[in-house]
Amino acid sequence: MKITPLTQNIFSTNALKALRELMGKQMPHQKRLDKIVALITEYLHVNVCSLYVLRPGDLLELFATKGLDEKAIHETFLRVGEGLIGEVALQRKTLIFENAWEHPSFVYKPETKEKAFKSLLGVPIIRGDNLLGVLAVQTTHTQAFSDEITETMQTIAMVLAEILATYQLEVKENLIKVESRSKVDGVRLIAGVAVGQAVLHRHSERITDILAKNTNVELKKLKTALEAVESDIRSLLDAPDIQADQQDMLTSYLLFIQDKGWISKITKVIETGLTAQAAVQKVGDETSERMGKIQDTYIKERIHDLKDVSNRLIRYLNGKNTTVQNIKLPKNTILVAHSMGPAELLDYDTEKIKAIVLEEGSQTMHVVIVARSLNIPVLGGIHNIFSLVNGDDELAVDATKGLLYINPSNEVLDEFDDKLQIQKRLTAHYQKLKKLPGVTEDGIPIALSVNAGLSTDLLMPEGTYFDGVGLYRTELPFMTSEQLPDVETQTDIYRRAILSLGGKPIVFRTLDIGSDKILPYFENTGEKNPAMGWRSIRITLDRRALLRGQLRAFIRAAEGKELRIMFPMIASINEFLEAKKTLQIELERERQKGGILPSAVKVGTMLEVPSLMFQLNELVKLVDFVSIGTNDLAQFLFATDRGNPMIWDRYDSLSPAMLKALKYINDICKEAGIPCSICGEMASKPLEAMALVGLGFTSLSMTPAALGAIKAVVRSMNQKEVADYLKTQLSSPSATLRDKLKSYATDHDIFI
C-alpha cells in the first residue's frame, strides 16, 4: 500500500477511534500501555512503536514496545541526551529523523535486536512542567511523517501522560511520610520573615477526558468556559478592596482570555479530535515550553500567568468553580506552591497568608509583585518542594537570608521572634524612603528608573518616587501571540504604557528577538551559537517591515509627546545609522499623512557588544543617549555563555576588567555631554549599584522590585569617597572586588 498524506490522515482518524475505545475499558496499567503501542503500530502502519518512561537519575526505561524484542522491556535504559530517544527528552520537543541509523547521536542497544530502521518520530510525554517519558515510532523505509501523524502522536502522548501521572500518584499515595526537621536554601524574592502552618497550593488540574466524542459540543464548552472565567476575573476586579496594581495585573489576564490568536489555536486543536480541556492544556503546554527556553527571566516569568488562565479554564471545563476562596486557612498560613499566578493568590484570604514559598520564581513574577503590595514575604527556588513539605508542617521562612526551616526547633523559633522585631524596624525605614528621590549623602542626584515590559510593571506602591522607565521591553506581546501583532495593537500597548507614567520619560527598546527568544510564527534557523547569531537589530534590519511597523506604532502612541527609542545589539555605527534612517522614513511618512508627530524624538543605542566601545568617540556624535546592557556586555566581554551553569559564575561583574570597561564608556559619554545609563542586571543589585555610582554613573534602571533597596544604597553613600576608593582598586589583579567592596560598605555604613 502506498503511503500518502491522504492515507496518513485516514490512519490518524482510525487510530484515535481505536484509542478512544481502548480507554473505555478497565485493565492494569502495564497491559494498557502494551495495547497502546500495539494499536499505534497497527493503525499508523509503522514497524515499531516504543514507550520510554523517565525514571530517577534521568534514565529513560523501555516500558512497552511493539516491533523490538519484548525481552528488552524494563531492561533497556537510555540517559536523557543519549541516543535519539534521549535527544527528544533533552530538547522536550517532537523530533523527526529521516535516517536514524546514520544520525551521529544514534545509539544501538543490542538487547532490543533493533533492525536498520530508517525514519524515527519521537514525541516527549509532558504533563505540566514535568517530563514523563518519550513515545517513538520507527519505519524500515524513509518516510516523511505528515502533520496529521505528528498531531496524532502528540495526542496519544497526552493520554499517556495522564496514565503515567495517575500511576505515579498511586505509588506516592502509598508512601508514609514521617515528620522531619530540615533547613533548605532558597532565593530571596521579597525580604521578610514569618512563622506559620504550611498550606499546599496545587494548581494543576487533572484532565478527565482527552478524546472528544462531539467536536461541536466541545467548541460550545470552550465558549462557555471562556465567558465564565472572564466573569470571575471581572468579579475580582470589582472587589471593593482591590488595589491599583492588582487591578491592572488582573486586567492583563483578560488579554489572554480575549486573545483571538490563542483562542483560534485552541479551537483548531479541538477540531483535530481533542476535548476542550485537553486542547487548552496542549496549547498552554506548547506555549509554556517555548517561552520556558528563553533565558530572559522577565519573559520566562510570564508563563505563570498563562498557566493560571489555562488552569482556570480547565477547572471550569471539569465542572468545578475556578476559585479556592472556600478553603479555610489557618490564622498564620505559609502558602507553598510550585508556581502561582497573581489571580490565584487573590483567590485566598490574603490577610491570613504570612509568607509564600515557591519552587520556581523570580522578582519579576506577577504573583511576587502582588505579594509585595500586600507586604507578604516570598521565598523561591525550593527544589522538589512537595517532596519536602507536607500540609500542616510548621514552617519558619527567612526570605531575607533565603532559608526555609521545616518543623523548626524551639531554638530556631526563638531566633525568629527576634527577626520579626527587626523586620518591623526595616519596614519602617523603607517606608520613610519611599517618597524620596535618589540623592547621595554628598548631594549627587542619581536617576532611579525601572525596567518594564507590561503596564503592570509600572505600578508602584502608592507614593513611591521613581524617575521613569529606562528600558521598556517590547518583545513580550510578539512572543505570547500566535501571530504578528499589527501596528494598531502595538500602538495601543505603547500608548497605555506612556499614559500610565503620567509624563515621566520612557525609553522604548525595539524588538530584541532571536537567540533564545524565538517567535512562534518565525522560522527557527537552528543556529549553533544563537547568542552571537541572527538576533535583535540584525533581524529587524533584515526584515525591515517588522522594524518599520514597530517604529510607526511608537510614533502614533506618542500622540505629540516626547518619544525615546533605543536600538539593541548594535555592533557597528553603520547598523545604528541604518536603524535611524528607517525611523526618519517613518517620521516623514506620518508627517505626509497628516499624523501627529512627537514633540521631540531622542534616539539612542544599547551598548552590549564590545566592538562598539572602540567606536564610541564617533558614536557619541550621532546618538542622544547610551544605555549599557551589562548582561550581554559581560557575556561577550568574558566569552561566557550565561545559559551554561558550568561557567556562568566564573567571572564576576565586579571584576576590575568589567568595572574598567564601564568606566571607560561612561567617561567618554560624559566628556561628550551624552547621557549614559545602566539598564542591565547590575543596576538591580545593591553592592553593584554602589560601585556603579562610584564609577560616575548617575542614571540606573532596574527591576521595579529592586527600587527600594537601591534607593537605600544611594542615599546612604558618599559618591566621591566611593569613587576615590575604587580608583585604588581598579588595577588590582584580583578576579573580583566583591569582598573588598562589601567590607568598604560595612565600614562606611552603606545600606547594602
Image (cartoon, grey):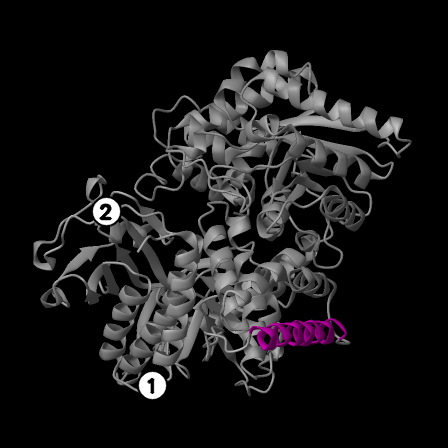
Mark 2 belongs to which amino acid?
A: Lys
On the rendered structure, is 367 left or right of 86?
A: right
- Mark sitting on residue 345: none
Residue at coordinates 25% horizontally, 65% vertically from top-left? 53
Q: Are marks 2 and 1 in contact (CB under 8 Å)?
A: no
- Mark sitting on residue 118: 2
Q: Answer with the quarter of the image where residue 460 lies.
A: bottom right
**Which residue is situated farthest in the front direction here?**
1
Which quarter of the rendered picture does the N terminus lie within?
Answer: bottom left
Q: Residue 231 in the image: state x and y as whole percent.
A: 71, 75
Q: Is residue 426 visible?
A: no
On the rendered structure, is 382 left or right of 444?
A: left
Mark 1: give few (<14), some (14-19) or many (20+) Cα within 10 Å.
few
Mark 2–mark 1 Cα distance, whole angstroms, equals: 34 Å
Residue range (magenta): 215-238
Q: Answer with the quarter of the image where residue 665 lies.
A: top right
Q: Nearer the viewer, residue 549 or 686?
A: 549
Residue at image mark 1? 25
On the rendered structure, is 456 left or right of 132?
A: right
Mark 1 belongs to which amino acid?
A: Lys
The rendered magenta stretch, by its main secondary structure, is classed as helix
Q: Is residue 633 above or below residue 163?
A: above
Residue 489 included in the magenta stretch of the image: no
Residue at coordinates 23% horizontally, 65% vertically from top-left? 55
Residue 225 included in the magenta stretch of the image: yes
Q: Nearer the viewer, residue 48 or 450?
A: 48
| Earlier sequence position, callout 2 versus callout 1 | 1
Task: Tell me the SS state at disc 1.
Answer: loop
Q: Residue 38 in the image: state x and y as whole percent.
A: 25, 69
